[in-house]
Image (cartoon, rainbow, N blue to C red):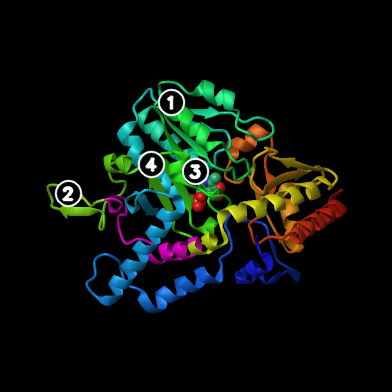
Amino acid sequence: MIDVNRIRADFPGLAQTVHGKPLVFLDNAASAQKPRAVIDAVAHHYAHDYANVHRGVHQLAERATDAYEGAREKVRAFLGAASTREIVFVRGTTEAINLVAHSWGRHALRAGDEVLITEMEHHANIVPWQLMAEEIGFTLRVAPILDDGRLDMEAFAALLNERTRLVAVAHMSNVLGTVNPVQEIVDMAHAHGALCLVDGAQSVSHLPVNVQELGCDFYAFSGHKLFGPTGIGVLWAREALLEAMPPYQGGGEMIREVSFQRSTWADLPYKFEAGTPHIVGAIGLGAAIDYVTAIGLQAIAEYEHGLLEYATEALESVPGLTLVGRAPHKGAVLSFVMDCAHPHDIGTILDGEGVAVRAGHHCAMPLMERLGLPATTRASFAFYNTREEADALVAALYKVREIFA
Ligand code: PLP
């Protein structure tokens, strides 16, 4: 059971007013607020234990290294990964997917091969593949969605063939909220000899994830959407794949030996962590993982499902409002349009009422084109949001109607 009042007290960012109104923060799909535990972990490390990792022989370097590597173990446990060798710290989901595209993609893909994505992908899971496709000459295929926002599984199955080398799919859509049947998708990809990359940017903060149960080959997520710092994220990949992949970036930390003739690479995961890493970001992410784990992702998922059902019904009561994304299995992301106002104008009016939402294409322009919409307004919930906040959103939407209708 979620004690939402106790939880809200942990998030100092939530306890403020904007434009004289209590803040209703519903922009969690873009980035989430931070609990005191994360803020304190970051501040404590900078104040007491800060030094560069791995290289030092002194006390602070040892403490920093222990904390940084401790965070890696927390991520391993959080994802249910077999080994910390499979946990690569990166800047975020975007960098994780670029790493796979540039390292695995350049190494494994050939002209004539196919990479299969879906119509609901974020630009982060489209553009890296386009860049590589241009270089290598493989074909990027796109599985369509159904009108309610589900992936069209029949069309997806029909697009899989012996040329498919990788399926790259969002676990949860940042626009539609759709939770894709990743286990089924992975099994179908594997049956065709393809690997499967899962973009977990939206899912890790809303539902339990176990990469071994999902059976996927790559999993990417960002710390900042999981109540951790910005600038830190994770690529998980099977150890054998990472072993076979060439480095993505070169520099310090990722080498074993360097000479002007040739260099050799460090063991996993350091082969993929060139340069001084975001040490304190990783430590903050570890604190965020401790925080959500103590509450429990299953409890979070159940609480948010209740919020989703409540908010969906409440939004449906607003005249002239159309929800976009009605998949039966979805997270608490509510994208919508109104017949009386542009999404950006809606966002501005809502801001005046203290309600923070996002308006625009949500880094999913091809999906917007499929939906025939230039933009939507999006309210995205986290486990610290309440039904009263959904009511405040609806009241603010009535204000929009008053002004524009
Ligand atoms: N994938 C999805 C589904 C997202 O929602 C986002 C961010 O909104 C990303 C990828 C990119 O994440 P980041 O900007 O943290 O790299």
The residue beneath circle 1 is 191
Q: Position of residue 255 (x, y in %)?
A: 22, 53
Give the CA separation, mark 1 to mark 4.
21 Å
Give 158 or 18, whichever is nearer the viewer.
158
Residue 316 x, y percent position in the rendering: 80, 45
Q: Marks 2/3: CA distance?
A: 32 Å
Query: Residues under labels 2 and 4: Cα distance?
Result: 22 Å
Amino acid type, mark 4: Val
Give the residue drawn at x 51%, y 46%. 200
Proximity of marks 4 and 3: CB atoms separated by less than 8 Å: no
Tell me which numbered mark, 3 or 1, is placed earlier along the sequence: 1
Q: Are marks 2 and 3 in contact (CB under 8 Å)?
A: no
Disc 2 target residue:
263
* Mark 3 beta carbon near ligand 1 (under 8 Å): yes
Q: Residue 1: within the magenta? A: no
Question: Mark 3: few, some, or many residues within 10 Å (few <14, many ≥20)?
Answer: many
Q: Which residue is mark 3?
A: 199
Q: Nearer the viewer, mark 1 or mark 4?
A: 1
Instruction: Answer above or below: position of 127 versus 147.
Output: below
Amino acid under disc 3: Asp
* Disc 4: which residue: 100
Disc nearer the start of the sequence (2/3): 3
Kindly report which numbered mark, 3 or 1, lies closer to the viewer in this rendering.
1
Q: Magenta segment, which residues?
A: 268-289
N-terminal-most mark, 2 or 4: 4
Query: Callout 3: helix, strand or loop?
Result: strand
Q: What type is the residue that disc 1 sits on?
A: Ala
